[in-house]
Image (cartoon, helix red, strand yellow):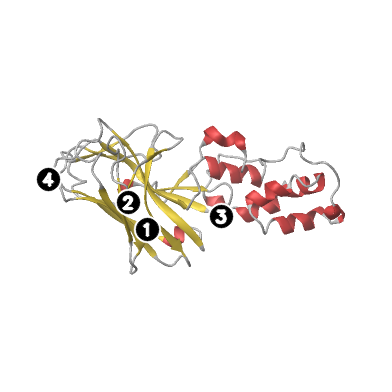
Amino acid sequence: MGQSHGRNITGPSPFDSLPVDCISSIISFTTPRDACVAASVSKTFESAVKSDSVWEKFLPQEYSNLIPPSRVFSSKKELYFALCYDPVLIEDGKKSFWLEKASGKRCIMLSPKEVSITWGSSPEYWQWITIPESRFEKIAELIDVCWFEIRGGMHTRCLSPGTRYSVYIVFKTKDGCPGLGDSPVDVGVGLVGQESSQKFIYFVGPRGRGRRDVTRPQARVDGWMEAELGEFYNDSCCDDISLSVVKTDTPNWKSGLIIQGFEFRPSKARFMSKQVKSFGLL
């Protein structure tokens, strides 16, 4: 069910006798998905769901600092969906922030400038490039290395508490990513001080089935590729997360990888772009 525009409202509800402000208050304790479903109950509920008091509860507390003063929104609902569809740069452009549409959970993409890339400062091995389809001013392009190693992380305070997150590397490849694309790459994600999840990914993958224990990348609606590095549960927002992407067990020279960043989003919540804005929440 998408956002209600009145066409699904068939008659009065027994709750219509409640004051609209009371209905709005109740709905604000649910989720954005539930609010849009509630809007289809009756015209009274539809009116209640439009209230700023509902959508302000779904916004992060620091929302006023996330939007440039030059941008003006007609309602808190409009502002909410702007933060879902138009990620904003935070922390001096080091992170990209947006909200998962159905739940309002926080999502973060970490710039490659925020992780440690072995030989990343040597232009003969890695270059920092600017391309229009990237969220960040500078992203990393692998030129040629034998030792491929990326390690990094961030604090869980940037994310929503009580939420299971998946972490993805977001990238593109050139010329099949020679020496790296079809070879299993060791990746891991975990909370510092606890055992990390370990798995293998392909950046491209061999023709045919390949190894069953190696995760293949997936195409995104924004034109990039992604591969899941692992999952973790953010219990209390007081931990550090570590991630690793390593291929050091072969002497082959490796090239042809462009890394936009590392994305943290609620598990099973698929990336959505402006191209699917018209489909609503569900």
Which residue does the numbered mark 4 point to in the structure image? 251
Q: How far apart are marks 2 and 3 (CA)?
A: 23 Å
Residue 242, image x, y percentages: 33, 59
Q: Distance between the residues labelled 4 and 2?
A: 27 Å
Name which residue type carries label 4: Pro
First in residue order: circle 4 vs circle 1: 1
Residue furthest out toward the bottom: 193
Which residue does the numbered mark 3 point to in the structure image? 60
Which residue does the numbered mark 2 point to in the structure image? 114
Q: Label 2: few (<14), some or many (≥20) within 10 Å? A: some
| Residue 15 figure quarter | bottom right
Asked if the residues shown at circle 3 and circle 4 are in contact, with their CB atoms under 8 angstroms apart, the answer is no
Q: Label 3: few (<14), some or many (≥20) within 10 Å? A: some
First in residue order: circle 2 vs circle 1: 2
Which residue does the numbered mark 1 point to in the structure image? 154
Asked if the residues shown at circle 2 and circle 1 are in contact, with their CB atoms under 8 angstroms apart, the answer is yes
First in residue order: circle 2 vs circle 3: 3
Residue 167, image x, y percentages: 40, 52
First in residue order: circle 4 vs circle 2: 2
